[in-house]
């Protein structure tokens, strides 16, 4: 399955994505917006999905969401009816030059055609504006978390290593402005974790028998671990944020 096909796989699970994917910690969003903080902001959530990051932005200024998938966009509109939500892509943003103080991307920057996306983000940002990309991932410093990935055996969804950092944002139109990590604890259950994993691209494109075998191994592993055997537990996540400033 090619990257574009995987990138387009989420619409089939839009309702589940909205129900089960985690949001973003306040501290991570605060850090992303720190260079432009101090007043009402014009904010773009690019590749907004069902609005997980959009929700964290609505009290910070005037928010516009752009999303290419019609099913994901419909979920966003139903959950956040007060947000301006447009169909569009990172490579062709349907908005005027200099429209925003900040463009934020949650869980999606790796799906873009980066050369075209950088050019479009630079076009819609004002000089001095912020581009920030955020990702939630399981915390690979925790032994039992690494273990459940090994038990599942899904090589296409690797746990983040303790020493791993996402690539910095690098383009002539921007000045790279660093990287930060934020702990993000997610109360969940065995069924909740499986439901969340079903919304990941590897699960959406996998052969059904392969996918269900992986989840059976995962359930057996979690049933045997003291941290998760009760069926209810806290999943330790880390939110990575990379930031750049428009020249």
Image: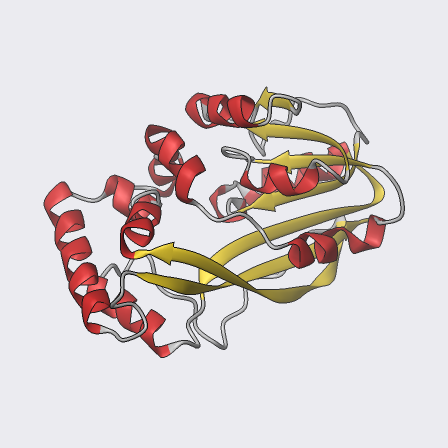
Q: Residue furthest front?
A: 230
Q: Could you tell me which residue is drawn at 62 percent across and 58 percent down?
A: 241
Residue 12 seen from this side: yes
Left or right of 65 in this view: 172: right
Residue 19 image offset from top left, x and y in percent: 41, 38
Compared to 238, does 126 lie above or below?
above
| Residue 47 left/right relative to 118 | left
Residue in the image at 41% along x and 72% along y: 140
Image position of 37 with respect to 62: above or below? below
- Relative placement, left or right, of 188 versus 99 is left
Q: Residue at x 40, y 43 (%)?
A: 20
Splitting the image into 4 quarters, where does residue 66 fall? top right
Protein image colouring: secondary structure
> Quarter-wise, where is residue 129 in the image?
top right
* Residue 170 seen: no
Taking depth in this image into account, of 199 and 55 the one nearest to the observer is 55
Residue 187 location, x and y as percent?
Answer: 43, 58
Nearest to the observer: residue 235 or residue 4: 235
Q: Position of residue 107 (x, y in %)?
A: 51, 47
Between 131 and 37, which is closer to the camera in this rendering? 37
Q: Quadrant of residue 208?
A: top left
Depth order, front residue of 193/36:
193
Measuring from the top left, give residue 132's x and y in whole percent: 67, 50
* Residue located farthest toward the right when viewing the structure as drawn: 38
Q: In which quadrant is the N terminus drawn?
A: top left
């Amino acid at each position: 399955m090619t990257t574009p096909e995987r990138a387009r796989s989420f619409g089939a699970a839009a309702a589940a994505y909205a129900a089960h994917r985690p949001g973003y910690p306040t501290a991570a969003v605060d850090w992303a917006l720190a260079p432009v903080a101090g007043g009402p902001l014009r904010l773009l959530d690019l590749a907004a999905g069902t609005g997980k990051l959009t929700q964290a932005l609505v009290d910070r200024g005037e928010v516009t969401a752009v999303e290419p998938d019609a099913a994901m966009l419909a979920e966003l509109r139903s959950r956040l009816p007060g947000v301006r939500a447009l169909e569009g892509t990172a490579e062709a943003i349907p908005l005027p030059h200099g429209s925003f103080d900040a463009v934020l991307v949650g869980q999606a920057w790796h799906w873009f055609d980066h050369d075209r996306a950088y050019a479009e983000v630079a076009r819609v940002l004002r000089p001095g504006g912020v581009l920030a990309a955020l990702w939630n991932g399981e915390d690979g410093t925790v032994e039992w978390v690494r273990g459940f990935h090994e038990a599942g055996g899904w090589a296409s969804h690797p746990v983040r290593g303790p020493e791993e950092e996402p690539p910095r944002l690098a383009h002539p139109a921007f000045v790279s402005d660093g990287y930060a990590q934020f702990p993000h604890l997610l109360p969940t259950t065995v069924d909740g974790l499986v439901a969340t994993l079903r919304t990941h691209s590897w699960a959406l494109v996998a052969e059904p028998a392969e996918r269900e075998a992986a989840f059976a191994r995962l359930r057996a592993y979690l049933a045997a671990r003291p941290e998760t055997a009760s069926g209810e537990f806290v999943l330790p996540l880390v939110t990575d944020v990379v930031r750049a400033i428009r020249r």
